[in-house]
Amino acid sequence: MSLLVLLGTMAIAIVRLNRLFAVVILFDIFSLLSAALFVSLGAVDVAFTEASVGAGITTILLLGALSLTSKRQRQISWKRHLPAILITVAIGILLLFGLSDLPRFGDPEAPAFGPLYSRYVFGSPHEIGIPNMVTSILASYRGYDTLGETTVIFTAAVTVLGLMVRGSGARTWSGGGMDHHLILRINSKLMLPLILLFALYVQFHGDYGPGGGFQAGVIFAGGFILYCLVFGLESVQSFAPAGLVRVLCACGLGLYILTGLCGMLLGGNFLDYNVLAHDPLHGQHLGIALIEIGVGTTVAASMFAMFHAYAGYEPQA
Amino acid sequence: MNTSILFITICCILLTMVLALYRGIRGPTLYDRILAVNGFGTKTVLIIAVYGFFKGRPDFLDIAIVYALINFISTIAVLKFFEYGGLGGFLHGPGAGNP
Amino acid sequence: MIWNVVSWALLLSGAAFVIVGGVGLIRLPDFFTRLHAVSIPDTLGAALISAGLIIQAGLSMVALKLLIILAFLLFTGPTATHALAKTALHGKLAPRTRNPEKTP
């Protein structure tokens, strides 16, 4: 519970602080504490995703956004926003009332332990057969929801690119690197293959332990972002040009949808993996592998494209 | 006996994290704060590894590796932000960040 | 078992080094001295704690992952502090010296 108190203190500090850079660092630590909270509740996959996305990519993207605005928040007078404050407080009180109606943590009568629970927990070893139940629920039983999540990430990337990329779109990346940090450059070059290898490990190990497409995509993008930070934005032009990265954002989502459509073409429902191979179990494995690759590709390309939209922004001057 | 030794280790690392947080809040210059956050991240990696052994679930080591990576990349991003004034580097030129 | 005792000794000494580093972070007077306090005992403490955990884990995938974490911390810790020191020097942060005239 001390974690919750710390989280609450950080939230108040984030709202009250004026210096935006301190707010970004506090967001970083806030995400880390949330990840610790999820670990203490036993949700390892969620903690993994929160640590990588919240503490890593979000900090970098917020820093990129911060570099384009002023360093301090303008003073806001609370009198102007009085109606908004009242509505928010009212909704907060309503939510607290609703909270008292929720079942207790671990209550066997809770709706989470209804018939779906038995279907997922006891049916997953037979129907899908992968050890990590989170991936089987995420990718197979609730595959349609995951399609929605991937679409959200794709939409975010499209929105950022639409707002930040000017004119006909930058054909090449442009921006400088950290030229005089010799040791940093050498070490980054040494570590980049290991980071990418680890991303691939997380991607394909998602069936057996914590991992999967989302986390792997973020780590992949993180490796490329590290390289771009140290060597300048032009350094990746030869193997990851701007157009290719933007197309890849859509390709991952397209792979996901194509897998679903293949299910329909082969006689099953949309996103039905049982018909994809000669045997339902193999079909499930194939389907999950394909959509995880799709998710990983979209997430990696989207994060990288958003980073470049912020970092390579040239004011119209 | 094993769990109590692990528990003592976790408490020691937690204490150091609190000390690092104090330096992060009090640090007179900005670089003190960046140093404190970097140290906080490194201790977090250690605490996740020891906590995984404490609970008997070795899955946590993946999170520790990822967080070691993320901590490093975030520190480099913050440094670049302060030295070059932006993540791309050519916004204002070198040495232009304001601590 | 003797290996258990060795592992406990490594874990406790690692924890002791980490605390020493933390105390140094509070007590040392200048940013550049605090840089020493964070990176050096931190890396050594991480190495000792990882060695203690590897002995407990035996020869398995868990030990390999611990080795990867250790290698990663050994690579990135000193690099990050070196980059930080260089940035601080570029940001015209002067180290505290005995004679105020002789600053680099």
Image (spheres, coloured by chain):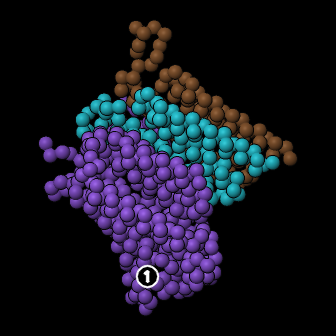
Chain colours: A purple, B cyan, C brown
Number of disc labels: 1
Which residue, as the protein is rendered here, is positioned at the far bottom? A267
Q: Is residue B24 above or below residue B56?
A: above
Q: Is residue A172 above or below residue A232?
A: below
Choose between A190 and A123: the one closer to the eye: A123
Quadrant in which residue A128 is drawn: bottom right
Mark 1 crowdedness (10 Å alpha carbons): few <14, some 14-19, many ≥20 = many
The residue depicted at 62 percent of the width and 42 percent of the height is: B14
The residue depicted at 44 percent of the width and 89 percent of the height is: A268
Q: Is residue A20 above or below residue A262?
A: above
The residue depicted at 58 percent of the width and 46 percent of the height is: B45
Pinpoint the chain carrying mark 1: A
Is residue A3 left or right of A15 when viewed as pictured? right
Amino acid tagged 1: Leu
The residue singled out by tag 1 in the image is A271
For the question of whether residue A144 can be seen, the reply is: yes
Quadrant (top left/top right/bottom left/bottom right) for the C terminus of chain C: top left
The residue depicted at 15 percent of the width and 55 percent of the height is: A167
Which residue, as the protein is rendered here, is positioned at the far left? A317
Q: Position of residue A317 (x, y in %)?
A: 13, 42
Q: Position of residue A199 (x, y in %)?
A: 49, 57
Choose between A115 and B45: the one closer to the eye: A115
Q: Position of residue C14 (x, y in %)?
A: 68, 37
Which residue, as the protein is rendered here, is positioned at the far right? C1
For the question of whether residue A24 can be seen, the reply is: no
Quadrant in which residue A118 is drawn: bottom right
Badge 1 element = loop
Is residue A188 left or right of A19 when viewed as pictured? right
